[in-house]
Image (tube, grey):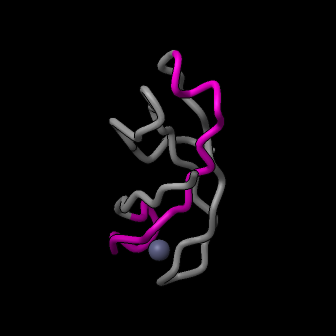
Amino acid sequence: MDDVVTVDCPSCGEPTAVGVSLGEEAERASRRISIEADCDVCCRPLRVLVTIRRGSVVQAEVASGW
Ligand SMILES: [Zn+2]
């Protein structure tokens, strides 16, 4: 039960897809997780804060400040 979110890369400004692993407990409560990924465009690392509620991604934003 995975999902994919698209965010704007903080390094190159291009949209990039980030895979999200949705845990089973996400179906019961909302939670916020931090995901580290590499940009599809410039390959630089980025960190995304994802809010999951009832097994679905409801919000995704790029975390600032490494
Ligand atoms: Zn990039």
Above or below, 39 against 10 in this view is: below
| Residue 49 position in % (x across, y down) | 50, 38
- Which residue is depicted at the point 49% across and 41% down? 63
Q: Quadrant of residue 8?
A: bottom left
Residue under the image location 63 percent in, 62 percent down: 37
The x, y position of residue 20, in whole percent, is 56, 52
Residue stretch in magenta: 9-28
Q: Quadrant of the C terminus?
A: top right
Viewer-side residue, 23 vs 41 = 23
Which residue is drawn at the image coordinates 51% and 16% (left, top)? 29
In this rendering, is residue 12 above or below 50? Answer: below
Place residue 45 in its image quadrant: bottom right
Left or right of 46, for residue 52: left
Foreground pick, 12 / 39:
39
Q: Which image quadrant is residue 16 in?
A: bottom left
Q: Is residue 15 magenta?
A: yes
**Is residue 36 left or right of 49 when viewed as pictured?**
right
The single residue placed furthest to the top in the displayed view is: 29
Residue 32 in the image, given as x and y percentages of width and height: 53, 27
Number of labels in the image equals 0
Question: Does 51 appear in magenta?
Answer: no
54 sits to left or right of 22: left
Q: Position of residue 61 (x, y in %)?
A: 39, 43
